[in-house]
Amino acid sequence: MTTQPFALPEFYQPYPARLNPALETARTHSKAWARELGMIEGSGVWTEADFDAHDYALLCAYTHPECDPAELDLVTDWYVWVFFFDDHFLEVYKRTQDWAGARAYLERLRAFMPTGALEFPKATNPVEAGLAELWTRTVPSMSADWRQRFAESTRNLLDESLWELANINAGRVSNPIEYIEMRRKVGGAPWSAGLVEHATGAEVPARVAASRPLRVLRDTFSDAVHLRNDLFSYQRETQEEGELANCVLVLERFLGYSPPEAAEATNDLLTSRLQQFEHTVLTELEPLFAEHGLDPGERLRVLKYAQGLQDWQAGGHEWHLRSSRYMNAQARPFRLGGPRGLGTSAARLGLRSRVRQLAPEPFAAVGPLPVPELYMPFPARPNRHLDHARRDVLDWSERAGFFTMVWTRESLAGIDLAVCAAALDPDGTRDELVLGTRWLSWGTYGDDYFPQVYGTTGDIAGARTFVSRLSRLMDGAAIVPANPVEAGLADLWPRTASTMSAAGAARYRTAIESMLTSWLWELDNHRLRRIPDPVDYIEMRRRTFGSDLTMSLARLAHERVLPDELFTTRPMLNLDNAAADYACFVNDLFSYQKEVQYEGEVHNIVLVLQHFLQVDRGRAVAVVHDLMTQRLHQFEHIAATELPLIADHFELDPAAREALNRYVAELRNWLAGVLKWHRDTDRYDEAVLRRRHTAPAPAHWLRKGHLTGAVASF
């Protein structure tokens, strides 16, 4: 008997698993269904003994404890199909490393997921036949919005198997951030979340389905499902299948941990994601309901959906303890007595993970942080219009009113945002550089203004109104600017949007609103003195830094040449995210003292990792440095090996291929420019910080005449 590589950790599992009473009916039905489709005898994948031992009906009876027998039969058939697909893909394509065959096979499966009329090609294998049969039984009762979302998650589940195969072919273990993002797609939990809507009869209202709270519920659910599976399946995947897509293995390689240490770290992340789920339910759903005016029935559907995801977590854990697919000896569930049900687990909490989220006393004298030598293979090039942009942004910012509070002309001159804009766009015209520098000034000023005005008072309602007014201003509403941020946007938005297509302006507005709403997330964490979950932090950091805002200008320059669909592919999304993470972490390293010591900040990757990994600052900085290096290596890998395949897939003509190359070159400029600016600016200099933070704070802008004059001068 093979020795386990580690004892399973103590799991945070506060929800009771319940068993659907229709289990035996589902067992009988699912075996007959699988045999009829050819998944058992003659498939070369499963024997009847395999099927019985895996017991997918038990999984579904645990994860969907309240649905009726017919619905449980349907859900069980879906899971039989998805596990058969996974094992079939392993035997036919992963073991043989048949890239071309895998791509053709997955491309054909798209035809079996129509969002319109239920018409299918003739099935040629059990996977195709099963998908056609299940699609016909499932989608008629759901809305067009749900069909679209479920089709997308099913395609992701199937298509991203190519990512696993590509990594096996290259012998490549992904970095931790890449792994979490990709595991959501290839692991299939977002797909499971879609089935939860069907099984509970609680379809999420379309107008909130893409909101942050619902996205976080889905993503935390997905991450927890996958991390749990990685712990139970580590031995089988690494010793029998040659699998590289496992978080325990990823953390072994990245952090230099032993398998038991990596398993504990994976479990810590699993616990953190489960508690992020709870935090989102308790703190973000009610404001979402109010913001979108959901009626009682719609609110109940969202809560029932969240309860369904909770049931899935509890039931999935119980099934992992019993299934022959997994390493499940000596599993140690963590359970405490007390109240049960959605949102009540805080009363029974294991304190270790919660304590890590408690922010230390603010304004600790941490001192300057020595920034290590950072990997940057791209040169920063100057723009010949730099001096003009420097002069212009000072005058423009004064007209907008930035110097009446928060900033002075001297402080902005020292920040020197024109250096950043010039390096981001070294080949831009004078007018382009002027506009880019003004946008950087507006975004940076807003990032300073917002916490000074709303963070010190905890005025959540006022902050939401502030964000809402800025959105309405971009709608063209007749709003008289009430503060410098509104005055700046009132000037910048119309002159920028008028040069774009309607679709381009809509995308740019989305980037602006993404940044603005992320400030509300930061404000809420400050109010609670809560250090964010590391995954939530990294994903939200891209928004708070304004990555989309500045990077989208490069995309918009090529919007008429490159198809929109190209930017939603996995390689392009990963390219953008890898670049954004590197830039965000550059900022966090350089701004550590400014944020932690002088601003009482809790949003910094060094601080987040110090608390999550329970390490000192030096070790946290080393981990950040390694993450940055690997993210930039990933950026280079995608550009060199994956984008040419995407170009072939979209059959781009020479002009479009050149536009794609320019887009990548502009991201390289962006990365080099962000690093150059951080090295050149005085914004993070200790002597400057001491001087600015000991000077009397400027009075709040109460004299409306100053604002009227500023707007009139534009």
Image (cartoon, rainbow, N blue to C red):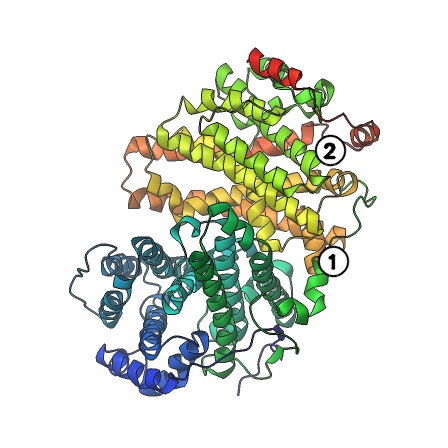
Q: Residue at x 53, y 41 (%)?
A: 579
Foreground residue among 58 and 296: 296
Left/right of residue 398 with respect to residue 668 in the rendered view: right
Residue 689 visible at all: yes
Foreground residue among 147 and 686: 147
Residue 420 visible at all: no
Instruction: Tell me if residue 458 comes above or below residue 610 in the rendering.
Output: above
Q: Residue at x 69, y 19 (%)?
A: 703
Instruction: Tell me if residue 384 comes above or below residue 359 in the rendering.
Output: above
Q: Residue 132 falls in which quadrant of the image?
A: bottom left
Q: Residue 136 falls in which quadrant of the image?
A: bottom left
Foreground residue among 285 and 363: 285
Which residue is identified by label 2?
684
Left/right of residue 165 with respect to residue 435 in the rendered view: left
Q: For mark 1, does the 10 Å Cα neighbourhood hold few (<14), some (14 to 19), or many (20 or more) residues?
A: few
Spatial CA distance of label 2 from label 1 is: 24 Å
Q: Position of residue 524 (x, y in %)?
A: 64, 47
Going by the numbered disc 2, the residue's amino acid type is Tyr
Instruction: Tell me if residue 35 comes above or below residue 550 in the rendering.
Output: below
